[in-house]
Amino acid sequence: MSIKINKLEIENVKRVKAVKIEPTANGLTVIGGKNKQGKTSVLDSIAWALGGEKYRPSEAQRAGSVIPPNLHIVMSNGLVVERKGKNGDLKVIDPDGRKGGQQLLNEFVEQLALDLPKFMQSTSKEKANTLLQIIGVGNQLAELELKEIELYNKRRAIGQIADQKKKYAKEQLYYPDAPKEPISASELIKQQQDILVRNGENQRLRDKALALHVERNRLAEKVNSLKEELDRYQKQLTQVDKDMATAYKTSEQLHDESTEELENNIANIENINHKVRANLDKDKAEEDALDYVNQYNTLSVKIDEIRQSKIDLLKNANLPLPGLSVVDGELTYEGYKWDNMSGSDQLKVSTAIVRKLNPKCGFVLLDKLEQMDVDTLKEFGEWLEQEGLQAIATRVSTGDECSIIIEDGYVAGERILDDEAPKMEAPKWKAGEF
């Protein structure tokens, strides 16, 4: 169970002459009053009493008083804490009557609970680090963040190269009519020679057909003139007719190939190869650009996986307040960074984290809450009650939101019998209401 302040009595500390307060156990106790009346002195007295010598005011004894400071605090676990005398000697008595010292108080008093504004005024990263150390995932998250930064920087470099490659590829010339590979002059000449050989064979067949035709005419004339040799020559004629028909048929099916394209290619080989190389360069540039784009996308997936791991790590952690998280090294609540949180949410977050630092400490001290409106105070007070927490705060105000009013070092409304040794009366307020 967390430990809270049941009762406190303060005499002659800073501006306080004599104050007795019984804070509400769960909720917000607002100490109001005008400036320089002793409100902050009350909080400083509590911090000194419970936090030790490092919280001792430089001028602890009230100016003009011959009586040394006297602090008396009763805790909810029955522990009695006293600081008396010029040196503020500490005496801690537990419910069984045994005495103890500062070490006993340190077991349940969280230092930031005595100075919550110190936490609230720290940087967003410092708040985030405090939270991460509390829930025990600081080292794991730090490793993930380092890996994310490494991948992010690598991806950024890859992206820059990809953009350069794209720009370079876009600027390259491209010839759609050029072949895919560079051409060789010797290969073109060989192709030309092959065509000429085939054309020569065609011509040979044409010449043969013509010669057969001449021979046929000569033989026909001889048949006419040599009737007596008709039978013999008729057989020769028949055979020649067959050979001639075959030759003409073959000749009609032949097609001479043009060497013009090859001759042009031979003549323009360097120009063609220039276009081919340009196309190959552009293809290579586009391929390189695509490769870096793919690398960039792969790194983006890895970065997303790491960010999801961070989210899962925090989601499964034992957070002091639902909705708390750390994004990009900064504390967030309900998706808002610190400077975008409402005043009430900032108080909730700070109080919850401080409680998590030391669950035994059930109270916090808050100075200067005048910047918050009454609705914000009320909302914060209701949350404190719901969470079973105690907050003692000061506010420059004399309004109804204040639990008590401090005037000239006293609780307003108390009857003072002696300036140096005042008699305490019950404060004219009801705990937990404002």
Image: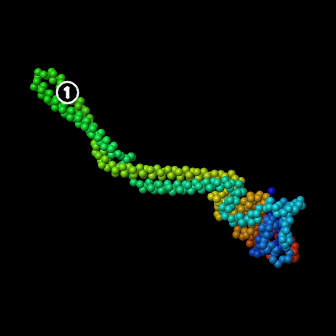
The residue at the point 39 percent across, 52 percent down is 278
The residue at the point 65 percent across, 64 percent down is 339
The part of the image, by quadrant, that contains residue 259 is: top left
Where residue 16 appears, x then y in whole percent?
81, 73
10 Å crowding of disc 1: few (<14), some (14-19), many (20+): some
The part of the image, by quadrant, that contains residue 343 is: bottom right
Given residues 39 and 238, the one toward you in this image is 238
SS for dot 1: helix
**Relative vertical location of residue 191 with respect to residue 50 in this rendering, above or below:** above
Q: Is residue 401 visible?
A: no
Given residues 374 and 43, the one toward you in this image is 43
Toward the left, the furthest residue is 225
Given residues 37 and 199, the one toward you in this image is 199
The residue at the point 11 percent across, 23 percent down is 227
For disc 1, the marked residue is 240
Query: Which amino acid lies under the numbered mark 1 shown in the image of this protein?
Result: Val
Toward the bottom, the furthest residue is 64
